[in-house]
Amino acid sequence: MTVRSDEFFRIVDALVDVERSEGEQYTSYSVRGKRFGYYWPRTRTVGLKQTLSEQQALVAERPDVFEVQFTAGGFGWVVVHLEGIDVDELSELVFEAWRLSAPESLVAEVPDWAERPPTLA
């Protein structure tokens, strides 16, 4: 169970209105100016915005895969180790991070994603 970096990029690229910002050590991802994720190539990890309860549940369930990154604005960010997750679960978490940041009007434009997160298929 491992997700390659290129698979993560395809998941993010399947989302609507994603803005990518290259930093010196990481890439950040936003939707309409609101950040929802990060990618660190050196550690092959991603940081994703989640609800506080989801952050706590993920870390408690699989601390070898998920770490608390930080909390801000009522959200809990998690670090996800790509070598410990499968592509379907990562797709769901990336979609949820995007959904938590996207304006409701944009989320409403992609109603099929409300039922099914983007995948590589």
Image: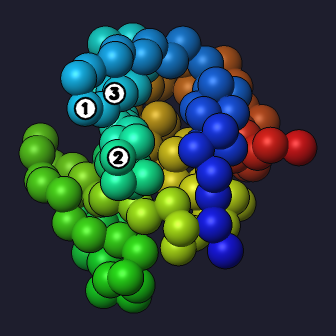
Identified at 76% across, 45% down, the residue is: 119
| As drawn, 89 above or below 22 | below
Identified at 61% across, 19% down, the residue is: 16
Identified at 70% across, 60% down, the residue is: 88
Residue 81: % across, % down: 42, 64
Where, by quadrant of the figure, is residue 118 drawn?
top right
Where, by quadrant of the figure, is residue 112 drawn?
top right
Q: Are marks 1 and 2 in contact (CB under 8 Å)?
A: yes
Q: Hey, what amino acid is under mark 3?
A: Ser
Q: Nearer the viewer, mark 3 or mark 2?
A: 2
Measure the C-alpha gap from mark 1 to mark 2.
8 Å
Residue lying furthest bottom in this view? Answer: 61
Q: Which numbered disc flags the more N-terminal residue, 3 or 2?
A: 3
Q: Secondary structure at mark 2?
A: loop
User: Can the viewer see residue 114 in this picture?
Assistant: no
Q: Which numbered disc flags the more N-terminal residue, 1 or 2?
A: 1
Measure the C-alpha gap from mark 3 to mark 2.
14 Å
Is 107 on the left-hand or right-hand side of 80? Answer: right
Q: Quadrant of the N terminus?
A: bottom right
Measure the C-alpha gap from mark 3 to mark 1.
10 Å
Crowding around mark 1 (Cα neighbors within 10 Å: few <14, some 14 to 19, many 20+) is: few
Q: Hey, what amino acid is under mark 2?
A: Arg
Crowding around mark 3 (Cα neighbors within 10 Å: few <14, some 14 to 19, many 20+) is: some
Is 111 on the left-hand or right-hand side of 78? Answer: right
Q: Secondary structure at mark 3?
A: strand
- List the residue tagged with mark 3: 28
- List the residue tagged with mark 2: 42
Q: Hey, what amino acid is under mark 1?
A: Gln
- List the residue tagged with mark 1: 25
